[in-house]
Image (cartoon, grey):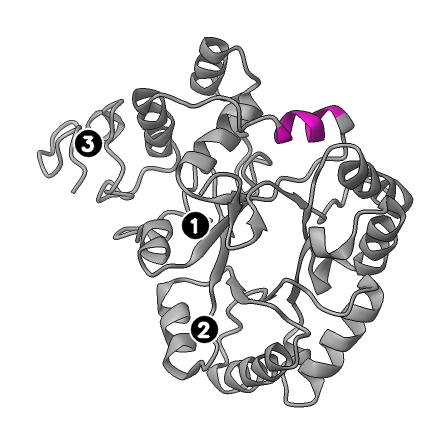
């Protein structure tokens, strides 16, 4: 669906920038909106910067109806029939807006009772027009299904960790589920975060030599190739950067396309990262034969298997 998903611009700005002072983050957001055409801004209670984002967007002069603003409930103490609406109203006030386009629970807190109360409170705010869409961040399929079992307004967005080393999860485990495809098959819009940062490992995908080779072939930066890869997987993206040139580059990913074989090669890099005993994630063909190299005496899995 080109550069939007249900009104969400597929290239967003992740405002969780922790390596720059607040005034600089404000300047960057203003610049991104005014000069670079960014319209989707992803915030959270936990980032403690909604006021900065609000000021920056106001100063940018971009009309509210052109913006897509997302934020999240991060603190489980604010789950409640009174607490949740109180928090959302405070967040709207800080952002300087009458509504947010997307509101998410920031993570699965493991308390179904308070989760349900908070969700029903958010549904009322949805009815009142303060929230235009509901979503979940850092939830697995079981959590999404639990919410769907009682939701009157179901979550339409799922925001999860996504890069070529961690396609939809933070740590691989045996029997790893393909959460991205699972969610997309159910009509959810998937938003990937930390696509470039390297978190939670030391080697960043942008520094991987295989990625550099693909980038050289297209005469693009490693970051552009990785963002384009996510885009071709059907995700929306919210990379963060405190660097103006990178913010500009990140936007320039709609004018080229990666060939199928390059997408497959980037997919297969996942097998170099902490290989699991059963070769998970099994939905990704192990083109480099990593699992076989790590298990020379086993024939459980062939190198090209994608079962």
Residue shown at 85%/49% (left/top)?
Answer: 56
* Image position of 262 (left or right of 230): left
> In the rendered view of the protein, which quadrant contains the N terminus?
top left
The image quadrant that residue 104 belongs to is bottom right
The image quadrant that residue 83 belongs to is bottom right
Label 2 packing within 10 angstroms: few (<14), some (14-19), many (20+): some
* Mark 3 or mark 2, earlier in chain: 2
Discs 3/2, front: 2
Say the numbered circle drawn on residue 295: 3
* Image position of 69 (left or right of 123): right
x, y percentage for residue 161?
50, 48
Counting labels gives 3
Calculate the distance from the C-alpha at mark 2 to the C-alpha at mark 1: 22 Å
Magenta range? 245-251
Q: Can see residue 2?
A: yes
Discs 1/3, front: 1
Q: Secondary structure at mark 1?
A: loop
Residue shown at 69%/45% (left/top)?
Answer: 39
Circles 2 and 1: CB atoms closer than 8 Å? no
Q: Can see residue 67?
A: no
Q: Secondary structure at mark 2?
A: loop
> Can residue 162 be found in the magenta stretch?
no
Q: Label 2, on which residue? A: 154
Residue shown at 76%/37% (left/top)?
Answer: 32
Say which of 50 and 210 sits in front: 50
Say which of 23 and 11 sits in front: 11
* Mark 1 or mark 3, earlier in chain: 1
Q: Label 1, on which residue? A: 169
């Amino acid at each position: 669906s080109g550069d939007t998903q249900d009104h969400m611009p597929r290239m967003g700005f992740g405002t969780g920038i922790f390596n720059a002072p607040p005034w600089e983050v404000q300047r960057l957001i203003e610049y991104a909106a005014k000069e670079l055409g960014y319209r989707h801004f992803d915030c959270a209670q936990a980032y403690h910067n909604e006021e900065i984002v609000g000021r920056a967007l106001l100063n940018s002069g971009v009309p509210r109806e052109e913006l897509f603003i997302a934020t999240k409930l991060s603190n489980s103490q604010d789950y409640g029939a009174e607490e949740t609406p109180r928090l959302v109203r405070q967040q709207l006030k800080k952002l300087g807006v009458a509504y947010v386009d997307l509101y998410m629970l920031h993570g699965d807190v493991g308390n179904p009772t308070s989760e349900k109360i908070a969700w029903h409170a958010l549904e009322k705010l949805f009815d009142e027009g303060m929230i235009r869409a509901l979503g979940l961040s850092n939830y697995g399929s079981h959590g999404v299904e639990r919410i769907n079992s009682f939701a009157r307004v179901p979550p339409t967005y799922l925001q999860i960790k996504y890069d070529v080393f961690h396609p939809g999860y933070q740590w691989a485990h045996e029997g790893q589920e393909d959460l991205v495809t699972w969610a997309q098959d159910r009509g959810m819009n998937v938003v990937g975060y930390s696509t470039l940062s390297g978190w939670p490992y030391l080697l960043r995908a942008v520094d991987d030599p295989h990625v550099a080779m693909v980038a050289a072939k297209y005469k693009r930066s490693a970051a552009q190739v990785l963002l384009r890869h996510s885009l071709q997987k059907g995700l929306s993206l919210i990379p963060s950067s405190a660097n103006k040139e990178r913010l500009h580059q990140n936007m320039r990913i709609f004018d080229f396309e990666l060939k199928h074989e390059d997408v497959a090669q980037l997919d297969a890099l996942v097998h170099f990262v902490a290989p699991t005993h059963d070769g998970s994630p099994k939905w990704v063909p192990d083109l480099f034969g990593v699992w076989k190299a790590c298990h020379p005496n086993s024939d459980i899995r062939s190198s090209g298997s994608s079962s």
